[in-house]
Image: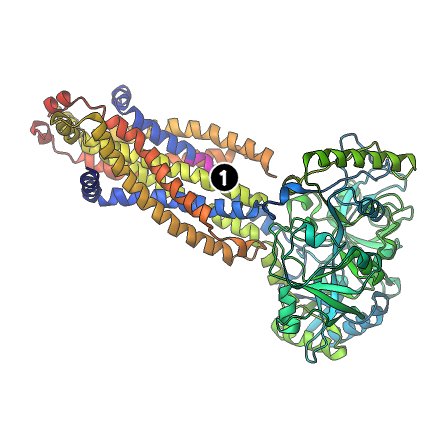
Amino acid sequence: MFSYYLDLALRSLGRNKMLTALMVLAIALGIGASMTTLTVLHVLSGDPLPGTSGTLFYPQLEPRDMDGFEPGMEPPRQITWIDGMNLLKAKRGDRQALMTGGAVPVQPAQSGMDPFYSDARYTSSDFFSMFQVPFLYGRGWSAADDDNKARVVVISRTLNDKLFGGKDSTGQTLRLKEGAFRVIGVLDTWRPNPHFYDVNMGNYSNAEDIFVPLTTSRDMRFDHNGSTDCWGTGGGDDDHAETQPCVWLQFWVQLDSAAKVAAYKEYLEHYSQEQKALGRFERPVNVRLPGLMEWLDINKVVPGDVKLQTWLALGFLVVCLVNTVGLMLAKFLRRTGELGVRRALGASKREVFTQLLIESGVIGLAGGVGGLLLAFLGLWLVRLQPSSYASLAHLDLSMLVMTFLLAVGASLLAGLLPAWRACQVAPALQLKSQ
Amino acid sequence: MQIKPILAALKRHKAGTLLIALQIALTLAIVCNALFIIHQRLDRIARPTGLDENNLMAIQNRMVGVEDKESGPLIRADLAALRQLPGVEDAISVNSYPLRGGGWSTGVHLNADDKKSKAHTTLYFSDEHTLATFGTRLVAGRNFQADEIGEADPKEVGDPAVVIISKALSDKLFPDSSALGKPIYIGDTKKPSTVIGIVERLQVPWNGNWSDTFYDNAIIEPYRLVSTFTNYMIRTKPGQLSAVMASAPAALYKTNRMRVIAPKNGIRTFAMVRESAYRADRGMAVLMGVVCAVLLGITAAGIVGLTSFWVGQRRKQIGVRRALGATQRDILSYFLTENLLIGTAGVLMGALLAIGMNLWMVTQFEMARLSVTYVLVGVVALLLLGQCAVLAPAMRASRVPPVEATRSV
C-alpha cells in the first residue's frame, strides 16, 4: 500500500510542478537557514571539556575597597595575586591552577628565522591534569618547578612543527626574552571551545603556543596581557603586580563532589572573613563559585548576533511552514472530489489520511534534502567569514540527524492539518454536488 | 464593493484565510525588526572617524631584544625615517587610533573633588604631528608645540599640563561654553590639564555597543609612549598610499632589523582597518536584507498559490456571477478586496507582533526601541505586496466566461 500511495503522491505532485517546487523550496530555505544558525550556536555554546566541565569551578572573591560600593554587586571576574596564591597554597580543591595570559618574544636558534611573539599562558602546574590537556611528547611541570621558578616550557604542536620540524623536542632549549628555557613537553592538538579558562583573550581563540610556570613568568618579567582592574592606590604597574590592589589572574578549581563544592564555598567565606578581619578586604563577604558552563553564561561568551540570527532563522522557518500549510491545504481541499470517490469506493478515513500524509512527507523529505544542501552552503559561507569562530562551523552527526528530524517533522506537522481537513469530506455530499 | 458576501465566502475557507493572515503577520513582524536592525548597523558604519581616511595607513610595530625603557630613541629614529620618505605627509607613533579596537578610556572630572565623572573619553598619546597626520581639523585654540611633548612609560603616564580634546567632549563637559583654556581632570587625579585646542571630530578606537555613549569623545595627550609595542600612523600625499605601503616597512627594517611587524594585519591601509572593524555589522545587515527579500518573496508566492487555487475552485460561481451581470471589473475587485481584507487583518496582528518582538529583543539583546515609522512602512509594503501578488490570479478569474455557469465539471 505504501508504494501505491507513494506513486499517487508523486503523480499528484507532478501535476502541479510550480506549486510543488514552491513548497519544497520554502521548506528547504527555512530548514537551511535554521540549521546553519543552529549549528553555529551549537558549536559556540558547546561544552569545552565534555565529561569534566561539571567538576570545574571558578571562585570569585570581593577584595575591593568601599569606593563605589553598592549592595548586590558581582565580585570581580578575576583575582589578585595574594588571594590567588593563598587559595593555590591552601589546596582545598582536588586540583587547582592560578594563571594569566601574555605574549613572549621567541628567538629561534635557527638562522634565517626572525624573532616573533607567541601567545603564552603563565600557569601553575595543575593546569594540564585539571583540563586534561593531551601531550604528544613529554609532560607538564611539577609543583616543585612552580616553587623553584624553573626555566621550563611546554609548547604547542604548531610551534613544535614550526621550530623543531615536528620532532620530539623535549630536552631542547628555547630562548624566550633573553632567557634559556628547557622544553619539557609538547602538546597534541588542543583547542577547547570556547577558550573558557580566560575569556579576556578572545572567546574562541586558539589555545596558546607557549606554557610556562606562573612564578617563572614573574621572575622573567614576561608581559602580561588581558584585563587588569585596580582600585584605591593600584596603578596596574606590571613590575609590582604581586602587591598591587589589582585583579589580573584567573583561578580554577576542580571539585569532584557536591559535598566538596559546598565545603569549598564555605572555605571561601571563611577566607573572606579572615581577610576582612585582617583589614585587607573592606566590603561585606561576597563570594561566588560558578561552574564552568555557568561561568561561560555569565560572561555572555556566545555573541548576541549569533543568537539574534538563530531567532531570525527560526522565525523564517515558521513563516515557510505556515506558507506550506496554506498551500497544501488548498491543494488537498481542491481534491475533495477525487477523495470523495475513493471514500465512496470503500477507503477508510484513515487510509485517505495516510495517503495525504505520505504526500506531505515526500515534500518534507525533498525539502529536508534541499535544506541540508543549503545548510552546507550556509556553513561554508560562515567559514569564509573572518570571525574567530568561523573555522569551527561544521555540521556534526547530531546536527545532521537533527536536520532530518526537523525537516520531516516540520513537513508532517505542516501536512497534518490539511490532511485532516481533507479527509473530513462526506463522500455522499461530494458525489452529489458534482 | 460589498464586503458582506466576501466575508461570507471567507467563512467557508477559514483555515486558508487564517493561514495567509498569519503568514502576513509573521512576515511583517520579522521584516520590520530586520529593517530596523539593518538601519542601526548602517548608521553605525556611516559614523565618520574624523580622519583623512583615504591617505592613511597604520603599522603595528614591536621591537625585539630591548627593554621598554630603551625604546624611546628607536621610536624617534623610526619616526624620522618615516617622515623623510617620499610621498609621506606626516607620521606619528600613537597608542591607538579610531576603529582599531583596543585603547585607553577614562572618566573626565571638572573639579578635583568630584566623585562622579562628567564624561567618559578615550585617550590618545602622541606628539605635535598628530593633527597633521590624522587630518583632523582644529576648530579652536592651537596645536601642541614641540617643547610641550614629553616621553613617558605607559605604566606611569603623568597628568599633562596641556591637552587637545574633541568638540563632542568639549560640548559634553561645557554645554554652554567652550572648553578652550579651561582646566579638566583626567581620571582620578588632583592635577588639572588645560585645554589648548579643540578638534572638529575624533572617534574612539572602539565601535561596539558599549562605547556608543561616548564614541566621539577623545583627548590627545602630549606624550610619546616609550614602549616596545607601538602603532605608527602614516598620512601620505594624495595618490601615494600604495607606494608608501611598500616603502614604509622597508625603511623601518633599514633603520633597525630587531623588530616584528606581524605578517597579518601588521601593515594596513585605513580602508582595511575600517573594513575589518565593521565586517560583522555589514555581514549582519546583508544577512538581514537577504532574509527580508526571501521572506517577502515566499509570502508573495504563497498568496499567488492560494488565490490561484481559490480561483480554480470558484470558476463555476464566478461564471454564475458573470452570467447574472457582473462585469470583469467586479470580479477583479472582488479578489482584490478579499485580499485587502485578509491583508488588513494580517498587518494588524503583525504590527502588534512586531512591537512585541522588539520589546522582547530590547530585554535580550542591546537593542533600541522600534520606531513606529518602520511598522507603518512595513504595513503599507505588505498590503501593496499582497495586492500585487493577487493581481495575476484575479485577472485570470475576471476572464472566466459567463458560459462556465452552464458547464458541469
Q: Is residue A202 left or right of residue B404?
A: right
**Residue in front for this viewpoint, B233 or B140:** B233
Q: What residue type is labelled 1?
A: Trp
Q: Which residue is drawn at 39% across and 49% down?
A: A372
Q: Where is residue B299 in the image (x, y as percent from the top left)?
A: 35, 38
Q: Residue at x 20, y 31 (%)?
A: A334
**Residue in front for this viewpoint, A432 or A276:** A276
Quarter occupied by the N terminus of chain A: top left
Q: Is residue A395 left or right of residue B212?
A: left
Q: Where is residue B99 in the image (x, y as percent from the top left)?
A: 66, 55
A71 over B283 or under it: above or below? above
Res. B196 image quadrant: bottom right
- Determine if the magenta segment contains residue B84: no
Q: Where is residue B187 in the image (x, y as percent from the top left)?
A: 84, 46
B288 over A433 or under it: above or below? below
Classify mark 1: residues with Cα within 10 Å, few (<14), some (14-19) or many (20+): some
Quarter occupied by the C terminus of chain A: top left
Regarding residue B332, the answer to whether it shows in the image is: no
Regarding residue B340, the answer to whether it shows in the image is: yes
Q: Mark 1 points at which residue?
A: A311
Count of marks, rendered view: 1
B54 over A260 or under it: above or below? below
Res. B26 image quadrant: top left
The secondary structure that dominates the magenta segment is helix
**Residue in front for this viewpoint, B231 or A426:** A426
Tell me the subunit letter for badge 1: A
Res. A90 image quadrant: top right
Q: Give the range drawn in magenta.
A: B27-31
